[in-house]
Structure formats: C-alpha cells, structure tokens
C-alpha cells in the first residue's frame, strides 16, 4: 500500500467489476458497474500472492480483490451512505480544493449506494451461509 499516484478518491464513484468477478461470492449477482462511496488517499499497489482483482474505479485499479474464497479487500466504503460521504467531503473540502479537486461536484453527486450496501450485506451473511451448508 502506498499513496495513490492518481490522487484522492472521495465521493460517490463508478465501480466496474473485473472479468470473473461474478464467480466470487462477494460480487455475484451485482451489475457489471455500479456506484460506491469512497474516501481514501492510499492504494493497494501489489496484491498478496494468489489474489484476484474483482473491481476497479477511475482512480483505483484495485478497488476490490479476493484471496481464496473467504478473504476480501475493498477500497470503497460499503458502510457509507450519501449523508456520510457528504460529511467527509465537507470536512475535507479545503484539502480537495488544494489538490485540484471539486468538492462542489462531489457534494452534488454524493448518494446512497444500494449495490455497495449489498456488498456489505453479502460480506456479513457469507459466514452464516457457509456454516449452514457445512452443518
């Protein structure tokens, strides 16, 4: 992990699933692209051995990845709703302007992200589903 050379990613952003992401339990059944809420300046630049990229954004080539069938990393925040991301933008608006970003645009496009929330629900449910299958 290092500072993202493409800059800060803050707001509601488009996420695009990678080829093969549908085979992963975390992203199965979700559309090829959908919006998620993000707030970060760091990036994964080298994946762990055996990891697979699951999704990317315009500023994040590794926005989600998996190792095996039960370990995931996501660069977005599925727990953020539109109000939370707007709060982050407001608090960091001076930094965004100094970095050449447009906080007004981020505020206007900030929204709830139902598919992002579904990623979180799936993550929480997967251990329960697996335990039932094994039990």
Image (cartoon, rainbow, N blue to C red):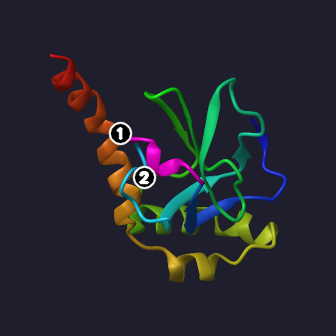
For label 2, the SS is loop
Report if the CB atoms under discs 1 and 2 are less than 8 Å apart. yes
Residue sitting nearer the eye, 20 or 69: 20
Residue 73 placement (x, y as % from top left): 55, 37
Q: Earlier in the sequence, mark 1 or mark 2?
A: 2
Residue density around tag 2, few if under 14, some if 14–19, many if 20 or more, within 10 Å:
many
Q: What span is in magenta?
A: 19-25
Residue 13 placement (x, y as % from top left): 57, 68
Q: Horizontally, is 31 left or right of 8 in the view?
A: left
Residue 122 placement (x, y as % from top left): 31, 44
**Would residue 22 be counted in the magenta stretch?**
yes
Where residue 78 is drawn, which disc sits there? 2
**Residue 96 figure quarter:** bottom right
Residue 23 placement (x, y as % from top left): 45, 44
**Residue 66 figure quarter:** top right
**Residue 126 figure quarter:** top left
Residue density around tag 1, few if under 14, some if 14–19, many if 20 or more, within 10 Å:
some
Where residue 94 is drawn, which disc sits there? none
**Would residue 101 be counted in the magenta stretch?**
no
Q: Nearer the viewer, mark 1 or mark 2?
A: 1
- Could you give the CA–CA distance between mark 1 and mark 2, rounded to whole angstroms? 10 Å
Relative to 34, say whether 7 is above or below: above
Q: Horizontally, is 113 left or right of 89 in the view?
A: left
Which quarter of the rendered picture does the N terminus lie within?
Answer: top right
Residue sitting nearer the eye, 84 or 48: 48
Relative to 93, say whether 6 is above or below: above
Where residue 123 is drawn, which disc sits there? 1
């Amino acid at each position: 992990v290092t500072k993202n050379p493409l800059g800060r990613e803050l707001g509601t952003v488009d996420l695009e699933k990678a080829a093969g992401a549908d085979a992963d339990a975390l992203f199965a059944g979700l559309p090829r692209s959908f919006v998620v809420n993000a707030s970060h300046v760091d990036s994964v630049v080298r994946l762990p051995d055996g990891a697979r990229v699951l999704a990317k954004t315009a500023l994040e080539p590794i926005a989600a990845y998996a190792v095996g069938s039960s370990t995931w990393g996501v660069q977005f925040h599925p727990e953020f709703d539109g109000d939370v991301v707007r709060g982050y933008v407001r608090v960091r608006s001076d930094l965004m302007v100094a970095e050449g970003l447009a906080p007004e645009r981020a505020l206007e496009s900030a929204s709830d992200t139902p598919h992002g929330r579904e990623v979180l629900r799936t993550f929480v449910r997967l251990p329960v589903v697996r335990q039932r299958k094994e039990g």
